[in-house]
Image (cartoon, helix red, strand yellow):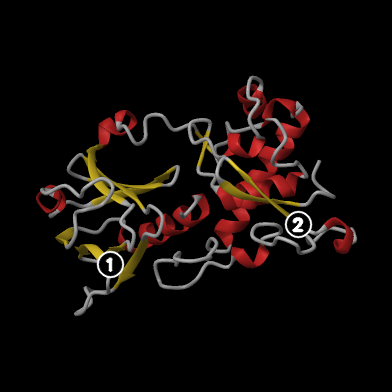
Amino acid sequence: MPELPEVETIKNALNKAVCGAYIQATEVLCRKFRVPVPIDLAEKINGSRIIFLKRIAKYIVINLDNGLSIIWHLGMSGRVKICERRPENLAKHDHVVIITDRGCLIFNDARRFGMFVTCPTDKLTENPFLQKLGIDALDENFNGRYLYQKSRNKNSAIKILLLDQQIVCGIGNIYASEALYEARILPQRPASSLSLKECAKLVESVKTVLHKAIKAGGSTLKDYRQPDGRMGYFQNEHCVYDKTGQRCPNCICNVNKTGGIQKIVLGGRSTFYCSTLQK
């Protein structure tokens, strides 16, 4: 699933391509997503102007000048494609096509776990998909004291807390593992065991990793591509994620003795860490 850096990269590309554009036509070739595409989507958005784009957690929100916003989630395998014009032949799994006077947007989603719906802009904070989200991982108010306070009564693993979108939103499996490595904190440690100093270090590491990933265009492991079709490149900078048995970049251990990077499952998710450096 695209995480914060991938969604931020896509949002930035959309902002550059179509902010200020008028929506001329909308084609919905398949409505059967986890949340069905509204039957009246074209009627609601055609003729409107895109005035603002933002990211909320892992959602792209497109504000229109008619008082509506599009809430766009990429699900597990969704892709956004930006073209100069509508292709004569659409690709397999191209399900939603938005034609503007500045280019064409295509939502491709093979597994159809994504979402493309509308909501009154002034009701976004009440939308059921957005209203329970926690603080954004890049928000200046996401700091060590915030994480410390939220973790005091949490006996679950710190990595599981980082993935709780009602506490801090935008962090997914890849970046939780990478941030915990950056902070030298074991992912399985009880969240309540972290000191205020460790929480501050972890927040700093989360933001460092996320900013690096955004700069690299995100991580391409399977389906993700940037809207122009290019891969992200941050996977080349992963220190522990999906590197079981390898030596981490900063380790001096004997891999033959330690087994290198370890893999465990926390909360049903694969988790990677260095047992030598992380404590």
Number of the front mark, 1 or 2: 2
Please say if the residues under marks 1 and 2 sit with CB atoms less than 8 Å apart. no
Point out which mark residue 122 bears: none
Point out which mark residue 261 bears: 2
What's the CA distance linking mark 1 and mark 2?
A: 37 Å
Tell which of 196 and 223 is nearer to you.
Answer: 223
In percent of width and height, residue 67 lies at 20, 39
| Quarter in which the C terminus is drawn | top right
In percent of width and height, residue 59 lies at 39, 46
In percent of width and height, residue 201 lies at 74, 38
What amino acid is labelled 1 in the image? Answer: His
User: From this viewpoint, is residue 132 visible?
Assistant: yes
The residue that disc 1 covers is 93
Kind of element beneath mark 1? loop
Q: Residue at x 67, y 26 (%)?
A: 148
User: From this viewpoint, is residue 210 visible?
Assistant: no
